[in-house]
Amino acid sequence: MPTPRILMCPPDFYGIEYEINPWMSRSRGSTPERAHAQWRGLHDTLVKLGVQVELLTPQPGLPDLVFTANAGLVFGQRFFSSRFRHEVRARESPCFDAWFAGHGFTVEHLPDGMFFEGAGDALFCGPTLFAGYRIRSDAASHQHLGKTLNRLVLPLELVDRRFYHLDTCFCPVVPGRAIYFPEAFDHYGQRVLETHIDKLLPVVEAEAARFACNAVVVGKTVIVNAGSERLAADLRGWGFDVIFLELDEFIKAGGSAKCLTLRLDGEDAAAWDVG
Ligand code: ARG
C-alpha cells in the first residue's frame, strides 16, 4: 500500500461561533481542551497507522477550518477548490488554496454561481464519483466536475438536514463496498446506491446520529466515532479492524473523523485494492 497522505488542521481556533447546520448551538459551545485532546487522538491514530499527516496552520476567526474535508476535491495533482454556501466558511478558501498551491497542486475554481463543498459532498467509490447535493453543494457543480474529469457522476439528493453533507451518511470503504444511512436519501438515491455498489452496509439511525458514516478508512482499518457497535461488528465481518475514537466535541459542529481529514492522494485512495 502506498503511504496515504492526509491533510488536517489543529483546532486552535475551533469553536461554535455560528449555526449553519442543526448540530451547531452557540449556547452549548465546545470545550477547547477536550476538542484538542480528541483531535490529537485522531492525529496520533492516523500516524500510528502509517499515514503521513500534513498540517494546515490554524487561523483565528475560522473556527471550522479544522474540517479540511470541505477544502475541495483532490484529483491527482489537481485541487478543485470549494465554493462554500455560507459566507462564514467561504473565508476559509484562501487558506486552503494557498496550502495546495504551495504543495505542488494546481488550484482550480469552479464557475461562479454554483456551490460545492469538496470531499464533504463528492466521494469516489472506485472510478465513480458519488455526489450529494441540495443542502450545501449544487448538482451543477458535480456535473461540471464529471465533465472536467471525464468521470461518471451519480447525483444523490440529501433529504435529511442532519445529514447535510454526503460524508455524514455515506462512506466508501473499498471499490464496490460502502457504509450508508439509507433514510438520508430519497428512494431514487437509495436505488442508485443499491445499483452501483455491490455491498452496501446500512447503519441504524442511532448510530448514524453518532456520525457512524463519517469514518476514515486506512487500508484494512476503519476509524469510527465511538458508539457504533453494530456497524463495528458488521465491518469486522468484512475483515476490517475498527478503532473507536470519541470525537463528540466535533459532532457539536456537525462533523467527526472523516470531516477532520482530507485525503491528498484523492482518487487513488478509492481505487486501492487492500484485499
Ligand atoms: N460546521 C461545519 C459546517 O457546517 C461542519 C463541516 C463538517 N464537514 C463535513 N465534511 N461534513 O460546514
Image: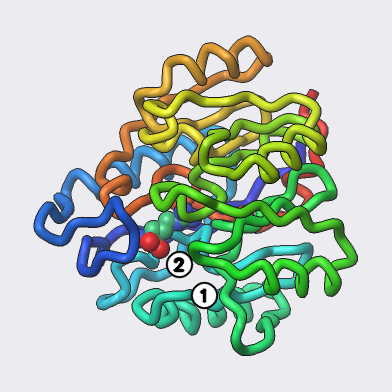
Q: Amino acid at mark 2?
A: Leu
46 sits left or right of 155 in the view = left
Q: How many marks?
A: 2
Corner quadrant of residue 91: bottom left
Using the image, determine if residue 5 lies above or below residue 234: below
Using the image, determine if residue 193 lies above or below residue 254: above
In the picture, the disc for residue 84 is none
In the picture, the disc for residue 96 is 1
Nearer-N-terminus badge (1/2)? 2
Q: State the quadrant of the N terminus.
A: top right
Please tell me which residue is depicted at 74% across the width and 24% down the height of the picture. 199
Q: What is the crowding at mark 1: few (fewer than 14 residues within 10 Å), some, or many (at least 20)?
A: many
In the picture, the disc for residue 56 is 2
Please tell me which residue is depicted at 68% across the width and 73% down the height of the picture. 141
Q: Amino acid at mark 1?
A: Phe
Q: Position of residue 225 (x, y in %)?
A: 40, 32
Q: How is the image coloured?
A: rainbow
Q: Position of residue 198 (x, y in %)?
A: 80, 27
Which of the two discs, 1 and 2, sits closer to the camera?
A: 1
Using the image, determine if residue 254 lies above or below residue 224: below
